[in-house]
Amino acid sequence: MFLEELRRYGPESSARQIDRAEAEAYCKHLATSHYENFPLVSWLLPKELHQHFYNVYAYCRWADDLGDEVGDPARSLELLEWWRQELQACYAGQLRHPVFVALKPTIDQFSIPAEPFLDLISAFEQDQTVLEYQSFEQLRDYCRRSADPVGRLVLYLCQQHHPQNVVWSDSICTGLQLANFWQDVARDYKIRRIYLPREDYERFGYHREDFDHGRINPPFLELMRFQVDRARQFLNSGLPLIEQLPGRIQVDIDLFARGGLCILDRIESIGYRVWETRPKVTKFDALKLLAGALWRKAFRSR
């Protein structure tokens, strides 16, 4: 599906430039058809922010797909560089791609700098060449560019981009990405990616060749216990952000943060045996998370 979009709107496209209304409709379609949780998020968000979130989401979706859906790392790098040039043209007032036609008014209204958008491109470029990480410091730097910018963009849209809020937001975003990594150890290894840092797994006595066999042994279980606790610390450290945000946006951020904590709880509940089972957040879990977020929002409003 994305390759068809690329033919239609990519660098070799001859499609006419569409107007803002068409571009916004395109971004809305991308957001509501690609992201299974977006209807819930849209319902919780203030209505006046819906289109702006669609526009930002569409940018992220395109950047992500240019990195993951092309099937050729060299070609992905070329296309990500094209996407960077389109972003720079957008900031210069030259609008060609429908995503940027829609995104430019959002950038202007909320005074969003280019940095978080550029950081995302940098991370997706790194995905083409880096498949394993030697240290947690290197992995954290990757999260800083692949996850943290999303939270910073949300802060801009909510007009809450302040230094302390950024610290809390970064902590939540990194914690959530780490939770996703630990949930998907087996799935990521199938595409030859290892996010568990070498310095960590070697310290616990796990070996590189153990990945080839999906070996579950005491060193692996201790390694995963350590990584789950580390991710949980990031998420918990960011929770103070929630009560700094306005209105129902508190519920959105509460859901994301505690959704990450729920993933970690599920990993713990299967005894950290993620080679055998991919832990999932169930529909019942999601309902509990929503009920809890709404209750906490009501309690804070008293």
Image: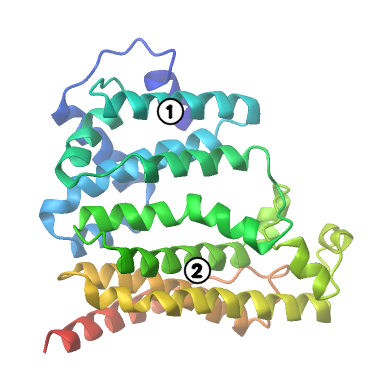
Furthest toward the top, the residue is 14
Do the CB atoms of the residues marked 2 and 1 lie less than 8 Å apart?
no
Q: Is residue 17 left or right of residue 223?
A: left
Q: Which residue appears at 29% of the width and 20% of the height?
A: 96
**Among the 4 quarters of the image, the one containing residue 109:** top left
Task: Decide if residue 302 is on the left or right side of residue 186.
Answer: left
N-terminal label among 2 and 1: 1
Spot occupied by residue 118 in the image (x, y as percentages of width and height): 42, 39
Residue 187 on image: x %, y %: 66, 56
Q: Nearer the viewer, residue 171 or 263?
A: 171
Q: Of the numbered discs in the image, which one, if any, rests on residue 19?
A: none
- Location of residue 29 (image quadrant): top left
Q: Where is residue 169 shown, x and y percent of the image?
A: 37, 65
Kind of residue sitting beneath label 2: Gly
Q: Which residue is mark 2?
A: 175
Circle 1: element type: helix
Q: CA distance from mark 2 to mark 1?
A: 27 Å
Q: Which residue is at 43% across, 29% downward?
A: 84
The quarter of the image holding the C terminus is: bottom left
Q: Nearer the viewer, residue 176 or 162?
A: 162
Disc 2: CA contacts within 10 A as few (<14), some (14-19) or many (>=20):
many
Q: Disc 2 on helix, strand or loop?
A: helix
Query: Height in image: 266 above or below 62?
Result: below
Badge 1 is on which residue?
83
- Depicted 280 relative to depicted 21: above or below: below
Which residue: 20% across, 35% down? 24
Amino acid on which the number 1 mark rests in the picture: Trp
| Residue 36 visible somewhere in the drawing | no
Task: For residue 108, say whether it is visible.
Answer: yes
Drawn side of residue 193 relative to residue 230, left or right? right
Q: Residue at x 51, y 74 (%)?
A: 263
> Mark 1 Cα within 10 Å, few/some/many (few <14, many 20+)?
many
